[in-house]
Amino acid sequence: MKLATAALALSATFALIGCASAPTSPTAAAAATSAPQDTLWLDRLSWGATTPELQQLRRTGRAAWLDAQLQPKGVLPDAAQAQIQALGVSQQPMAAQVQQMEAQRKAADALTDDTAKAAAQKDYQQALTKLARDASGRALLNALYSPNQVQEQLTWFWFNHFNVHQYKANIRAMVGDYEQGLRERSLGRFRDLLGYTAHHPAMLRYLDNEQNAANRINENYARELLELHTLGIGGGYSQHDVQELARVLTGLGVNLTDNKPKLKPAQEAQYRRDGLMEFNPARHDFGDKQLLGTTIKGQGFAEVDQVLDLLARHPSTARFVSRKLAQYFVADEPPPALVERMAERWRQTDGRIADVMRTMIGSPEFEASLGRKFKDPTHYVVSAVRLAYADKVVLNTAPMIGWLYRLGQAPYNRQTPDGYALDENAWAGPGQMTTRFEIARAIGSGSAGLFKAEGEKQDRPAFPQLATPLYYEGIAPRLPAATQQALAAATSPQEWNTFLLASPDFMNR
């Protein structure tokens, strides 16, 4: 079809749809006027607006939708839940899985034949990688189809905030469990999140706290706990505080066996074990510490809880984490007045994330920012698939994982503890945009392997549907002339899909 003919046909289609959906009453007109803004609101609070979600929001109103999001109870569609249940990472508790993998590692290392040993070690590494990819698949299925979209965004946010890197030691066998625990606590008290991460073997192993012992101090975890997890740089702590916190954390580590360390009788009562986390009093510094002007009496494991309470309730933590939440949900440089109101709400509610989120979402700054936050790679990929297929459940998340690797934001793959960057500058380079166009073309031209189940030779029929009620009601009315002209010039549905997914407008939320 020639370019002019295609443009004329597409323009005619737009006109027909506009006539068919034209409002016939003042009430309908008011609703139609707000649809684009509601779509932007959904884009910001979900992993990408879909037609069913927009319809639900318009039916119930924003307040009811948000109430349900902040008290998540919805369940995944059966097709998505069945896929998750079939994943290897879902088959047994983490402790048993990790111990099974550790036995496989030891058996491989014990082989004396070099060829057999290399093969067995490769099998072990591949098994670890499979567990991490299963966890990635589960995370993407939740992001795509969970009705609890705010919870899912926060799950990603908290993992990034309390980042661990999958390829250190055997953390690939732990990241799925670590992420699930963050999901369960994502809207609760920050203190619970902090305590959960401080006791999880993935964090203790990643930041080397299992090497932290009396008279052999390792400051890695203590430093990141202050700098990245709670107070933030400039939050009022000193190098001395790092050292004292490291002393508090001595003896807190990981035990992958079922064996208890040999302890003196006086130390027995101080021993703690929870899954793979172990507090070994023989490795703990029982001297008194001075942390942030507070005396921490040497009393063993109880010191950890005392310090976590202190850090979670510190005013600097309220400001630092509130700002980071606002950076993720509002703007690269969030308005200071909004951050201060969020921090105040934090202090009033003892760090209840749902209440801090409500303050942020209800602010005029949040509303004014809609459509102006650049999508990081995960938001781009997930929102594109959600727009293309809505609630039609994909059969294979491997293409999405591959795209995220190409875009530099693969799940669990940030090597440093600071997590992936949350600002536009990190993700808007020319190479990034070229790759996004290629992904847009892959999705826009067909199913891109998303409906090719493992073991099948070809995709099941599933052509993307982007020209949906969501598009005509919530997206098209706010597209600038340049984007509309580009769409009108498309010579095929595949090209039209590609142009929309690659448009500057789709890069923002």
Image (cartoon, grey):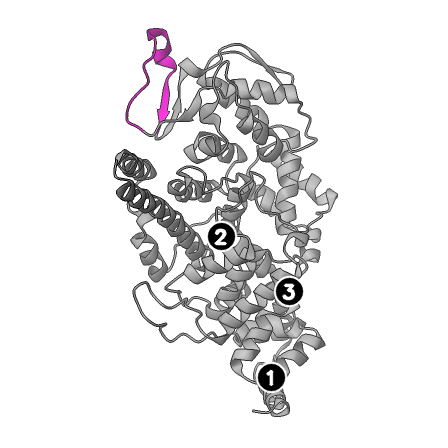
Vertical arrangement, residue 51 with respect to residue 422, above or below: below
Mark pair 3, 2: CA separation: 20 Å
User: Which residue sits at x=67%, y=33%?
Assistant: 233
Magenta residues, start to end: 257-274
The tag on residue 37 is 3
Circle 2 packing at 10 Å, graded few (<14), some (14-19), many (20+), is some
Mark 1 residue type: Phe
Q: Position of residue 452 (x, y in %)?
A: 36, 68
Vertical arrangement, residue 470 with respect to residue 91, above or below: below
Marks 3,1: beta carbons within 8 A: no
Closer-to-camera residue (22/389):
389
The stretch drawn in magenta includes residue 201? no
Mark pair 1, 2: CA separation: 35 Å
Quadrant where the N terminus sits is bottom right
Quadrant where the C terminus sits is bottom right
Residue, disc 2: 68
Q: Would residue 315 appear left or right of 84 to someone viewing this image?
A: right
Q: Mark 1 falls on what kind of element?
A: helix
Q: Quadrant of residue 29?
A: bottom right
Vertical arrangement, residue 93 with respect to residue 369, above or below: above
